[in-house]
Image (cartoon, rainbow, N blue to C red):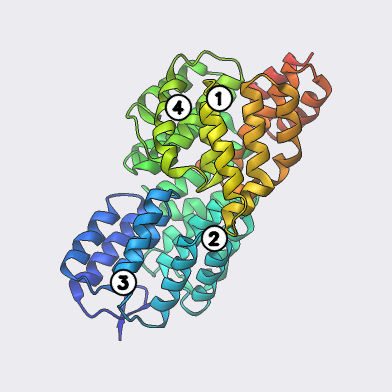
Amino acid sequence: MRLDRRDTPVSHASDDALEAYETALHQLQAYRGDPMATIDAALAQHPDFLLGHLFKAGALMTAAENRFTTMARQSLADAAKLKGNDREERLRGAIDLLVQGHYHRGGHALDELLADYPRDAFALQLGHLFDFVRGNALSLRDRVARVLPHWTPGVPGYGYVKGMHAFGLEECNQYEQAERAARVALSFDPRDGWAAHAIAHCMEMQGRIDDGIAWMETSSRDWAVTGILAIHNWWHLALFHLDRGNLERVLKLYDSVIFGQPSDMLLVLVDATSMLWRLHVLGHDIGTRMEALADIWQARMKEERGFWVFNDVHAMMAFAATGREDQAQQVMRSLDAAAKGETTNAEMIREVGMPVAKGLLAFGRQDWAGAISNIGPVREISNRFGGSHAQRDVLSLTLIKAAINGGKSNLARHVLAERTFNKPESALGWTLLAATA
Ligand SMILES: [Fe+2]
């Protein structure tokens, strides 16, 4: 029986296929290079490399897009006749659940796999990223904690496991432990963009605006090469500047490193849109930037509507801000249809996504009461449709601004009290509070 570098069993016997898997896995862990190209090259040489097919299918799923799910389905079909060992068959089963849209069940299947193969680094990272997709903070933290006893500093990839734990701790508001874990991760790989990102989140949530700007500007030389994660990290830097009230810098970052190079990857579109929506909601001039985003969303939503509601609501921001009523209505109709299913996304739509989409559309129509009545009741459970606290904060800002615009000063001050307590250094919170006077 072959073992990978972390002593996890692999059924395929070829040295170069296994070597390619190790390279692709490292690229995925470090967010550097192109794991898909690496594994595709190996599969071209070894079409019977089951773990390669499973890696491809799972990694495609982490992009949280319908078009990549279609490709993942194809990878599973390509591997259908290949027989794997126990670990690989369970990995296949878990990925199959994810492809079918059962994110909670898929996440649990990965956890059961990890109980027996706790150093399956791919299963761990896949589970971690889907914990993010389903907004499960406890699982972001504890899935990693459960395998930690089996990871020691000598095991290859130990640092990346600490980086994942750091993000989970942060999402559970354990900021000091999170930052410590992230710094351990960075001692193993100073260019670990996920660990640097966890520190950014700690500073964001604690309202350490100056620290956050200094940290992201200094560490950017290390994570700037991490592809889509780098764009997200630049987004975090922009968020700090927004908190400080430096809008010129926010737009400069947007025009250069966040969306200077237009992309149709939804992870990028989500960040770009939510940043512009924040500016729009706050009443700042964003020029024609949102129109450009809405055009891309419009083209992409033909395939992506109703797939993951976290994406749908960001498309809704673009449509609501640009007054694209037809597109907005199409999103609502597809959410209606998708909500009837049995998938995790159907639950997300019913519990959170539908009211959020309605609230955003209402805000776009300057129907402040509609924005308040839809977003208010679900804001505190909005983790159920995925993302991070920092990303979902856009809902609080929208609610606060709807309350201010709608003359509901008490409500605005009520919600703002959270912000001024948790982030006393944030100029934005105090500026908004002053606007309620
Ligand atoms: Fe983030």
Q: Disc 3 marks which amino acid? A: Ala
Q: Which residue is mark 1?
A: 325
The Cα atoms of the two marked residues, 1 and 3, are separated by: 43 Å
Q: Disc 1 marks which amino acid? A: Glu
Q: Residue at x 80, y 20 (%)?
A: 408
Q: Which residue is mark 3?
A: 79
Residue 313 point in image, percent of width and height: 56, 37
Q: Secondary structure at mark 4?
A: helix
Q: Which mark is residue 249?
A: none
Q: Which residue is mark 4?
A: 294
Who is closer to the viewer here, 417 or 359?
359
Q: Which residue is mark 2?
A: 103
Q: Disc 2 marks which amino acid? A: Tyr
Q: Residue at x 61, y 32 (%)?
A: 394
Of labels 2 and 4, earlier in sequence is 2
Furthest residue to the bottom? 1
Residue 245 point in image, percent of width and height: 57, 19
Q: Secondary structure at mark 2?
A: helix
- Residue 401: quadrant of the picture: top right
